[in-house]
Image: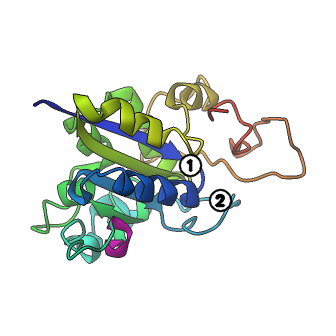
Amino acid sequence: MAQRTIAHMYDRFEDAEMVVQELEAAGVPHGDISLVANAQNRGQPGASGTAPAAGDEARTGTGAGTGAALGTAVGGGLGLLAGIGSLAIPGVGPVVAAGWLVATLTGAGIGAASGGLVGTLTGAGVSRDEADVYAEGVRGGGSLVTARVDEVQADRVEAVMSRHAPVDWQQRRAAYGSDWKGFDPDSRVRVYPANEGNPGTATPGPEDTFIPGIDPGRRP
């Protein structure tokens, strides 16, 4: 039976964690789930501030071998999150990650991450426009969850992944502004920090920042 890749991004790492756990509880195999999250914002609810830009190390892949074996660490009844580790993705920067997408990024442990997040996602069947938004989102502080499922499971998996406020990628793309033409590792980072002092308003700041949970790129 043909498989499809379902991908959703979350502004909070905790939401992505919950999605992974619920997918596992719903019977989706560990080997078909992946999590890639911005390393700085991991474990920081509504984290704010400037996300780390993709430095020279991330662009060249130097140091990516730290996470080269990720995606094969899960087993023996442990959940996907037990195998999470650090990785530098070219153009995106430092992330924490686990699962099949990471194994693809790193060549299943053979070498450093080389294809980039956009190329890996499009290779798995995600559209280029959607992949661009996810790469920019992870670089700016987000967490990406992907699941490989057959068509029979697709509706159930979509329902699970929609429970924890996933980002609407099309609205987020529009929120990046008309000057944003797609993911560019050399461009400034688009960040969505928390702004509890200004609820109900999604106002771009001087650094292209928006409010998570109430910005135009997040589902209600």
Q: Which mark is residue 50?
A: 2
Q: Secondary structure at mark 1?
A: loop
- Residue nearer the viewer, 49 or 188: 49
Quick check: 115 left or right of 7?
left
- In the image, residue 63 sits, relative to residue 163, either above or below, namely below
Q: Is 198 rendered above or below residue 59?
A: above
Mark closer to the chain start, 2 or 1: 2
Q: Residue at x 59, y 24 (%)?
A: 174
Q: Identify the residue at image location x=42%, y=45%.
A: 135
Where is residue 120 drawn, in percent x and y? 24, 45
State the SS at label 2.
loop
Please identify the quadrant where the N terminus is shown.
Answer: top left
Q: Is residue 82 magenta?
A: yes
What's the residue type where badge 1 is placed? Val
Which is nearer the eye, 26 or 157? 26
Q: Magenta span has 18?
A: no
In the image, taking residue 210 as reference, residue 137 lies left or right, namely: left
Query: Callout 1: few (<14), some (14-19), or many (20+) C-alpha neighbours within 10 Å?
Result: many
Residue at the image position 32 percent from the left and 27 percent from the top = 127
**Spatial CA span between label 2 and label 1:** 8 Å
Q: Amino acid at mark 2?
A: Thr
Residue 91 % position (x, y):
38, 53
Tell me residue 122's x, y (percent): 25, 35
Q: Position of residue 155 (x, y in %)?
A: 37, 30
User: In which quadrant of the rendered view does residue 83 lie?
Assistant: bottom left
Range of magenta residues = 80-85
